[in-house]
Amino acid sequence: MRKIREYLEDHILLFDGAMGTYYAQHNDDPDRPCELANLETPQAVEDIHRAYIRAGCGAIKTNTFGANRPNLGEKCVPVIQAGYELALRAAGKNAYVFADIGPIDAPDDDALLAEYSFAAFSFLACGARHFLFETNSSDHGLHAVAKRIKERAPDAFILVSFAAQPDGFTREGRLLGDLIRASVEDENIDAVGLNCVSGARHMAELVGRLSLPEDVLLSAMPNAGYPTVRGQRTYYDGDPRYFASQLSALRDRGARILGGCCGTTPEHMAAAVSALKTSAIPKLPLRSHKAEDVQAQEPPAEPNEFWDMLCDPDRKPFAVELDSPVDADVTKFMSGARELRDAGASVITVADCPIARARMDSSLMACKLRRELDIDALPHMTCRDRNLNATQALLLGLCAEGVRNVLIITGDPIPSASRDEVKSVYNFNSRKLIKYVDSLNAALLPVPFRIFGALNVNVRNFDMQLKLAQEKEENGAAGFLTQPVLTEQALENLKLARRTLRGKLLGGIIPVVSQRNALFMNSEISGITVDEKIIAAYEGADRARGEELAVDISAAVAAAVAPYVDGYYLMTPFGRTGLMTRIMDRIRADGNA
């Protein structure tokens, strides 16, 4: 057979369809990993490979999508060896064989790279030189493992494929265009494309929006429509002729590597063979490994008063947090917000159900503040209670309502006593959610959000906290709101953050109103540490004295953090907005705002 790069210069390469769903249709145990069939029922696997080749496919994938150590343990290598041998025997000289490696569940990027490398090196040991990394929702580990493969086998051909929804985002909130662009620029990746999640028409629309250079080897392997569930089985009812017509559309939009994913059968691929014979394709230009034509569009600028204040070196604006109501009565909340606005608060921050107890939605309250009080609002948005679709819908609404800033946090866990009744939804962590919002800024939103993250200056291992903050900045965070600074160690950590981070910093200040309040925060609230000297100062103090101390200590904290912050993040205790106005007045009087 010709070398695959030579073949692709003047041919369309048609892959097979979906081994997993096709095998499940002919197997009495659809929940059992089909990769184990390489060892248990190898003839069934080989027969499926041969069926796709008879249909006219010029490339087949090994039955190893989930063949990795986290999935299969000690059976991983035998499954890979058997899977490669079965595909090689079925293909003969009639089709290229690609080592198929699906996404791998790993605790961190180092572990992920180790698992990708283990699977890839196992294939290399079998003689594999064509690799498909498919159904990826991010590119973590892929660039590094591609480099490792090329170091061992410079003649290897590596295809990386991403799974994106019809809106152009992966399940981790990554923008398809960003992932494609990074792969195009990687000299170790030979081809890049899409597979799974989207049906053929939606995938054709996605490809049409990519605007890729002509020399890019693009692949497209859509599903056979969208699934339906009958009993405990999942079915795809996409018509083969319709599927084939959409593969032709994908070919016309620049895809030179085509195939099928979930639900596609030999019948689908036979129809594709007929449809793809209708016209010739131009010779592929030499690949430059540059992606000048794949440009991310900058969203249009629009005034953001709060952000402008943070960028002004002569100002230190106040962001004041006010908890939303626990019932449907917003009278007290709106009255307090009005008082804070009139006292000089630049933005009202609204927590998203602190300690995971239901309150009025922070985003709805932010919209109400924007409309009725004409004040900037900064809603907290957690990873806990919304999946990706719900998050996107909410952000679109916030954008339409004129909210321009969001604080992305992980969110407090559901209390253990409530977990049987209330389930958490963690589609992603705060870093991934920040990246998702940043991608929405570039691809979908007419006006961008300024994205803020949380920075806990009270944790013992602050180096790790800083590392996470730097990742948030890389993903799109423009600034950070810190936890309260109520100890010398917290102040030292804040100084280190100022030296380390690029983004804007808002120093956290929470008024301590009593000794009981201080003890409660020390013991019951994660992320807050109160100095023992402060706790002792409140001994025997009544409410009036407690508030006087709160003003004095908060002003002292503001003076201490002022050289290292761009603004202040004040947290209102027990709805005492009058106390917050006194604190803001005092900080201004001291010349620190």
Image: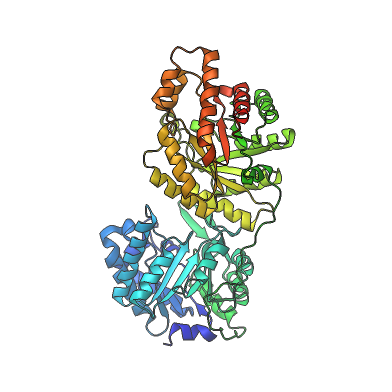
For this rendering, which residue is in front, 549 or 352?
Answer: 549
Residue 214, position in %: x, y?
Answer: 59, 78
Residue 587, position in %: x, y?
Answer: 59, 29
Seen in the picture, residue 124 relative to 580 is either above or below; the reply is: below
Identify the colour scheme used. rainbow
Would you say 526 lies left or right of 293 here?
left
Q: Residue furthest bottom?
A: 2
Q: Residue furthest front?
A: 591
For the C terminus, give its image quadrant: top right
Q: Residue furthest left?
A: 74
Decide if residue 519 is in sight here: no
Q: Quadrant of residue 64?
A: bottom left
Name the residue: 51% across, 43% down.
Answer: 383
For this rendering, which residue is in front, 289 or 90?
Answer: 289
Q: Quadrant of residue 133?
A: bottom left
For this rendering, which residue is in front, 220 or 58?
Answer: 220
Q: Quadrant of residue 279?
A: bottom right
Decide if residue 560 is in sight here: yes
Residue 235, position in %: x, y?
Answer: 50, 59
Would you say 177 lies left or right of 431 here?
right
Numbered circles on residues, count: 0
